[in-house]
Image: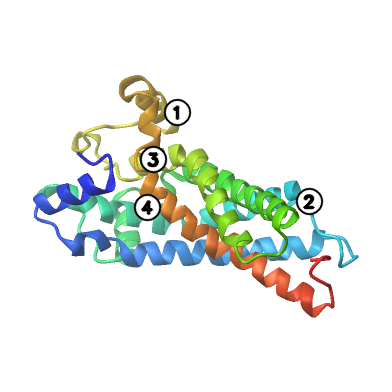
Amino acid sequence: MGYNPHKTFREIHENGGGLKQLFFGLDAALYARLSHLFVRNLVYKFIYDRKKPVKPTNDLSIREKAVISGFAGFLGALVSNPFELVMIRQIHEGTLPSNQRRNYKGAIDGIKKIIASEGGAQALWKGFLPTALKTIVLNATLTGCYDYMNEKMWICFGPTSLNRPLSILWAALWGSLLTLPFDNIKTRLQKQFADPTKDRLSYVGFNDAVISVTVYERPHSFWVGLFPYYLKVALYTTLTVYMMDKITTKWKRKAGLTEEQI
């Protein structure tokens, strides 16, 4: 049923779940987002400060910012993937019969059980390839599209209060369209059991998952869940690109630059 948020909620309700099930994996999600944002923003700011020209009126180009964002996002994905893995599996619990549930008590418990039952710490990075590709493309796209639209809005309308919010919505749209296929493949790989007989669909790896979805489910299946994913990306854009833009703008004002120079 679950091809849109309304049908998904109905399915959860009809299967005996409630509002509580919508928050499965909350602690793992918080660990994943916070660790990713911390690493991503720290690395971005570190490289930005060392690459920008000495003259304070100059800034890095949109392409340079996109490259730095992609690299910083990759490192953020590397750190947050174990928590992302636990989160996906906890969310998936509600769709499983009770005898197949992993029953992770939380993020840390989930990590311990994965290491113990799936062959060591390397299992924590299951699905890392599509996660990394998604994060690189997402960060590069968000930064590039946000800066481009913000600049064009400023040229057309001046420094209005709508420039940044509209730039966020624009950047989040393109980020969602370009990265949702990676997110869907990542989810399929990460929720699989180590024992393939327990899986309704089993994939050997990233390439096999892409081919299987394309051949058996048709390409539009890569964009299932676009609306809730767009809302998630819009929030992520606010917490990364917009936040860093506000911080750097504040520093530029402290340095004595005018609005035109910023």
Numbered tag placed on residue 61 in the rendering: 2
Circles 1 and 4 in contact, beta carbons < 8 Å: no
Residue at 34%, 57% (x, y): give it: 87
List x then y, in percent, for residue 106: 29, 66
Numbered tag placed on residue 113 in the rendering: none
Circles 2 and 4 in contact, beta carbons < 8 Å: no
Depth-wise, is mark 2 or mark 3 nearer the camera?
2
Q: 67 left or right of 14?
A: right
What amino acid does circle 4 point to? Leu
Dot 1 falls on a residue whose secondary structure is helix
In this view, the residue in front, 118 or 32, is: 32
What amino acid does circle 3 point to? Asn
Q: Earlier in the sequence, mark 2 or mark 1?
A: 2
Depth-wise, is mark 2 or mark 4 nearer the camera?
2
Disc 2 and disc 1: Cα gap in Å?
Answer: 34 Å
State the residue position of label 1.
207
Q: Earlier in the sequence, mark 1 or mark 3?
A: 3
Q: Does residue 115 show up?
A: no
Disc 1 and disc 4: Cα gap in Å?
Answer: 19 Å
State the residue position of label 4.
85
Image quadrant occupied by the C terminus? bottom right
List x then y, in percent, for residue 133: 54, 42
